[in-house]
Image (cartoon, grey):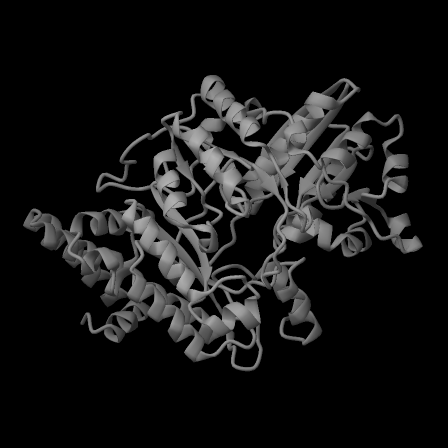
Amino acid sequence: MRKILFVIPHAGKDKPVENMQERHIVTPPYGVLSLASYLRDKSTTLIDVSILDLNLYPREKDIMDAAVREKIIEYRPDIMGISVMFNWTCNALKTYSEIARGVDAGIIIICGGVVATNYYGNIVKDNMYIDGVCFAEGEIPLLKLVNAADPYEVMENDPSWFTRKALAKGKKPVASFVENLDELPFIDFTMIDINAYEARLRKRTLNNTDTANSGLTLPIHTSRGCPFNCVFCCTAANHGKKMRYMSPGRVKHEVENMINKYGIKRLAIDDDQFLLDRERAKEILRQIAGFNIAVEVASGLSVAFIDNEVARLLKKAGLEIAYLAIESGSERVLREIIAKPLQVEQIETAVKALRDNGLLIHVNVIIGFPGETEEDRALSLKLMEEMGFEWNYIYIATPMMGSRLYDMCVEKNYIDRSQVFDEAHLYNCVIRAPGIDPDYINKKAYMMNLEVNFVKNYRMRIGDFETAAGYFKNVVDKYPHQAFAHYYLARAYEGMGADGAKIQEHYKKFRELINSSGQWKEYARSFALI
């Protein structure tokens, strides 16, 4: 029997306390599960597969390193695959491969993922413990590797594998895509503890529980690829620009399997471009509507494809929160910098359709792009305030490997490449370009967060104090030291006519926090709270 161990490094990244807009949400590792399910279903060799997901462990290096070592000693894998999805997981790749080689010199150590696909040459050059890098999607290359009498021969000769010898020969790897996604087996979630994971978007009540359909959430990816060329995105680098789809019938059958086998109450559709084929998406939503489960699309919906019919079907299918990937309120940034096929007027149309159908709306905005101006950031802030969204995520442009942004920053010397591995993430600016100062961008992003989510909170402005209180309490529960959350929770309770002791509890906590923190005091003065 050939034993395969998949190791998933922790995806979270330490952030400055004041920039904690959301905690690290742990969701099932769909990509690795897809690979493992494919191998189990199609391998002609007797295999056993195990998954070690370090996102379920405390984010402490010693604990995670020990978990990897103990798992290797206990399981004794023949092949160990390490997922490298984010810039900062390159450090974990080196650590875990070294641990594996120290435990058993005979283990075949491989890696794959977005960063591995775009950094393959450097990985084999800098990491002496790695035997091979899987380029782009892994199902087909991994199956060849697992079935082979000599896996090393596959890595040297297959076009989708890259090794040190390939580096010396100047080889350029080529992706091996699964063209018909209906041929993929159902995801086998028995390989993980499904109850240890969470949903990414939840509608909260004041008791911090779901309003309806609470229970197990499992993900599905019904398509792969992206034809667009957004500057910050690396999806196409891993999955290609050509769109590939599951048929609506296949999606229906897989969701039925999730309900019958695992008892899911919430489906997470994690496609990058779920609505791109609008007729297909509408048929899927019609099929899902009959299951009486909740739905989330946390990767973001493209507003260009949302009309009243789509909004109605989203609601009927069980969507509570529409998460919109708008990125900017500046037409210039959307067109000239991001290259996103979106116009601001389309945002207005989509928002009206979603509101008319009773959906809450979350959005993301990204600031800190080279070429961006203060006027552009002001337009994004203006859009969020005028449109009125339930929650706004203010992210910072991050040069992920495989994105045009990364290539641009390297070419123009806008980044220190060592920072990309250790410090670049959605809450910390590492780009230093004309008009872009990292310290200023970090502070600006958080000030925008405070303004639109607290000081000018949409639900507070329209007098819906109960919904606003639910959001503020959610923040307080996650981040007890977030001063503005305490202040505005007290304000929301006042609007609701809540118990005076409860109101004063949060005003008191607010005063304690601003008196003990110069940073919070500065923020409070900026918005005339003191």
Whether residue 447 is visible: no
Does 105 sit above or below residue 412?
Answer: above
Whether residue 333 is visible: yes
Nearest to the observer: residue 316 or residue 214:
316
Which residue in the rendered view is the most extreme toward the bottom?
A: 434
In percent of width and height, residue 102 lies at 76, 38
Residue at image point 8% right, 47% down? 498
| Left/right of residue 207 with respect to residue 19 in the rendered view | left
Nearest to the observer: residue 122 or residue 282:
282
Which residue in the rendered view is the most extreme toward the right?
A: 169
Q: Quadrant of residue 430?
A: bottom right
In percent of width and height, residue 320 lies at 33, 41
Does 209 sit above or below residue 252?
Answer: below
Nearest to the observer: residue 45 or residue 513:
45
Image quarter of the C terminus: bottom left
Residue at image point 71% right, 36% down? 178
In percent of width and height, residue 200 lies at 43, 42
In percent of width and height, residue 383 lies at 35, 67
